[in-house]
Amino acid sequence: MPQLRLALNQIDSCVGDLAQNAETIVHWTRHAADQGAHLVAFPEMALTGYPVEDLALRPSFVEASRVALRTLAGRLADEGLGGLPVVVGYLDRGEQDGPRYGRPAGAPQNAAAVLHGGEVALTFAKHHLPNYGVFDEFRYFVPGDTLPVVRVHGVDVALAICEDLWQDGGRVPATRSAGAGLLVSINASPYERDKDDTRLELVRKRAQEAGCTTAYLAMIGGQDELVFDGDSIVVDKDGGVIARAPQFAEGCVLVDLDLPAAASEAPSGVVDDGLRVDHLVLTPEPLAPYPAETPGGQAERLGDLEEVYTALVVGLRAYVAKNGFHSVVLGLSGGIDSALVAAIACDALGAAHVHAVAMPSRYSSDHSRTDAAELARRTGLSFRTVPIGPMFDAYMESLSLTGLAEENLQSRLRGTTLMAISNQEGHLVLAPGNKSELACGYSTLYGDSVGGYGPIKDVYKSVVYQLARWRNQAAADRGQTPPIPENTLTKPPSAELRPGQVDTDSLPDYDVLDRVLELYVDRDRGREEIIAQGFDEALVTRVLRMVDHAEYKRRQYPPGPKISTKGFGKDRRLPITNRWREGS
C-alpha cells in the first residue's frame, strides 16, 4: 500500500491578523517539511481566524483574505516549500453566485485551499453550514457544492470542513463513493465540557461511513467567548484510533499512514448529496517504501476538572494577549469567586501581571481581609488595599440610601475604583461573577459586574468550589503551595454588604440551585418538567422567576469563556422585554 506522512498542525489564529496568521502557517509548514511530511493541513479559517462574524460581510476583508492566500502560496514556494501540498482554511467568495434574497451579499464562503507549487491549486467551500448554538453560518456564508479530492503520492485524499463531518450526508458518503483512501477534515470546533468524547465517537463513525482513514484537525486557543481545545484525531477505516493530539496545546501531529492506492481512473461526476467531484492530481506515483518513524500515539487525556480549568486559563490568556493587554486587575474580597479568578489569572499570565485590590467597607469581616492577603502571599500577585469607607460615607451624606440601594452602592464604589485603576495603569478589569449569580441576577450592575472579561462567567457556583479544590490539590501534588486559603473554601459565601449576610439569604442552596439552573438554562426544560424531576414546586417557580427577570443584567455583562453546552451570550439569546413566564 502507498505510504503518506501526514502533518496536522493545530495552531492558534487571531481573527483579522492575516499577516501573523500567515507567518504561523509558514513556520509550521517548514517544521512539517523538516520532519519529512508529504501532506500538511491547517485548521478551518486558519488564515483569517475564526469566527470572523460580520467581517465576512465586508468585501474588503474578503478580498484581503484572498490576496493573503495567494501571497502565502508564493511565499511557501519562495522558501523552498512549494513542492509540499498545504491545506489551509480562509475566507473566500463564490465567483458565480449572484445576489439572491435571503443569501449574504457578496456570497462569502467558509473555504479552504490546497497550496502547491506557488499557486492556489484547488479551492472548495464548506458544504454543511451550522446554524445552532454559537454558529450563525447561514447568515454569513453560501455553501460549497463540490467534493474536493487531491491525489498525493498515489493516494486520493478527500477534503472536508468541520460541519461536513458533524452532519449526516454530504462529503462523508461522497468520499466513499469517490473511492478516496483518506479523508481530511479541518475544523475550528469550540470547546465545551465532555465534547472530546462526543468528538471521538463522531470521527470513528464517520470513518466507518467514509470507508477510509479519517483525520480530524482542530484549532487551539481562544477568540472572545470561544475556546478551542485542539484534540486532533486520526482513526483508521474501522474507527480504531491511530493518533490523538494533546488538548489545548499548539503543535504538529505527524503520523505515517499506509493507505489504499488510488484507482487508475480518477473519480468524476456527481456523487452523494449532489456534490460534484473536483479532482486534482498533484503527485500521481506512490513513494518508494520508507521506514515509518511516526506511527502515531495518543496524548494523555486531561481529567474533567483539569480540562475545564485549562479551558478557562487558555480563554483568559488569549483574550488578554489578542486585545493588546499585558496585565489584569480584580477585586480580591477573600471569597471563593475572586480567589478562583485570581488563581486562573496567575496561571494564565504569571503572577507579576496580576494586580488585586482589597476594598473593605464597614461590613467586611476580618477573615475576608486576611484571606485576601493570604492568597496574595501564596501566589505572589501584586496586592493593595483601597478602603471604600470614606467614599461610601460621602455618598451616604448626599443620598441617605437604605436597604438594597445602600448595599449596591458599596459594590458600585468597588467597580468604580477598579475602573479608575484600569484607566490609570492600563490593566484589564476581570469580573468575578459565576454562572449561578448571573442566572439569578445576584449581582450589581456597574458594581461586581464591571469588567472587560469574566473568566468564570460560564461556571456554576458548585463547580467553582470543585475547581478551586482541584487547583489546590494539583499544587499539593506538585509539592507547591496551594493558592487558595482553606478558610476561603470552607466559610459560607457572602457578598458582605450588610451585617451577617450570606448568599443563602437570597438564593437557595447552591447544590440545589445549580441543578435547577442546569435544567432550565442549559437544557431549556420547562417548569413542569423540572418539578417532575423531584424539585420543590415553590423553589422551581422562584428560581425561574429570578432567571427571567435578570436578562437585562446579563446583556450588560462582559464576555467570558464558554465551557458548557449553553453559555450566556452567543448561545442563549432571549428577549429582555418578555412577559412569558413558565407556569403562568
Image (cartoon, rainbow, N blue to C red):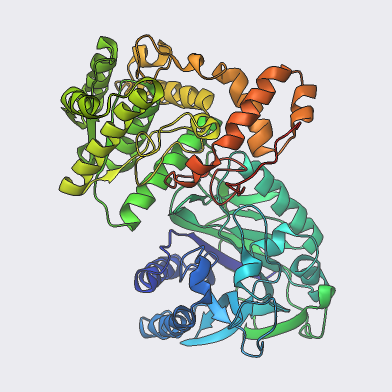
Is 553 placed above or below 376 here?
below
In the image, is 236 to the left or to the right of 465? right
In the rendered view of the protein, which quadrant contains the N terminus? bottom right
Q: Position of residue 538 (x, y in %)?
A: 69, 18
Using the rendered view, name the quadrant where residue 110 is placed. bottom right
Q: Residue at x 82, y 73 (%)?
A: 273
Q: Specify whether residue 86 is in view.
A: no
In the image, is 490 to the left or to the right of 361? right
**Closer-to-camera residue (119/529):** 529
Is 401 placed above or below 113 here?
above
Q: Specify whether residue 185 is in view.
A: yes
Q: Position of residue 292 (x, y in %)?
A: 56, 60
Q: Position of residue 479 (x, y in %)?
A: 32, 21
In the rendered view of the protein, which quadrant contains the C terminus? top right
In the image, is 44 to the left or to the right of 402? right
Q: Residue at x 75, y 59 (%)?
A: 167
Q: Residue at x 57, y 52 (%)?
A: 296
Is 134 placed above or below 541 here?
below
**Closer-to-camera residue (385/63):** 385
**Closer-to-camera residue (423/98):** 423
Question: In this figure, what is the number of numbered marks?
Answer: 0
Using the rendered view, name the quadrant where residue 449 is placed. top left
Is 572 placed above or below 527 here?
below
Q: Position of residue 127 (x, y in %)?
A: 70, 71
